Image (cartoon, helix red, strand yellow):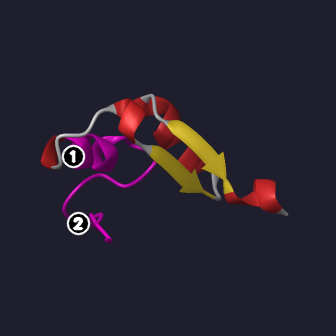
């Protein structure tokens, strides 16, 4: 399923707030998650929360 957090509700990336809230809302921990992204802000957010990161541009 899809979960969305909006910047007017929570700080935008690279701030880790959305990932932190996701873990809290769904009783998840860092090892349960991987962030897939295509920007430096995605990477910075993943690093700030200590979760694994996969860059979409790795596929190109």
CA distance for labels 2 and 1? 14 Å
Q: Nearer the viewer, residue 17 or 60?
A: 60
Determine the residue positioned at 63% across, 47% down. 54
Residue 21, x across and y down, in percent: 21, 46
Residue 7, x across and y down, in percent: 30, 63
Instruction: Say which quadrant the N terminus sits in.
Output: bottom left
Mark 1 surroundings within 10 Å by alpha-carbon count, few (fewer than 14), some (14 through 19), many (20 or more): some
Mark closer to the chain start, 2 or 1: 2
In this picture, residue 53 sits left or right of residue 2: right
Q: Main secondary structure of the magenta part?
A: loop
Q: Nearer the viewer, residue 41 or 30?
A: 30
Q: Which residue is mark 2?
A: 8
Residue 32, x across and y down, in percent: 37, 39
**In this picture, is 8 found above or below 21?**
below
Determine the residue positioned at 40% across, 31% down. 31
Determine the residue positioned at 25% across, 39% down. 28
In this picture, residue 7 sits left or right of residue 14: left
* Region in magenta: 1-23
Q: Secondary structure at mark 2?
A: loop
Q: Based on the picture, tell me whether residue 11 belongs to the magenta stretch.
A: yes
In this picture, residue 56 sits left or right of residue 47: right
Residue 30, x across and y down, in percent: 37, 32
Say the numbered circle drawn on residue 21.
1
């Amino acid at each position: 399923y899809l979960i969305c957090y909006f910047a007017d509700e929570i700080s935008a990336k690279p701030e880790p707030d959305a990932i932190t809230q996701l873990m809290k809302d769904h009783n998840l921990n860092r090892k349960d998650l991987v962030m897939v992204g295509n920007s430096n802000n995605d990477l910075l957010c993943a690093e700030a929360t200590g979760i694994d990161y996969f860059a979409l541009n790795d596929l190109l």
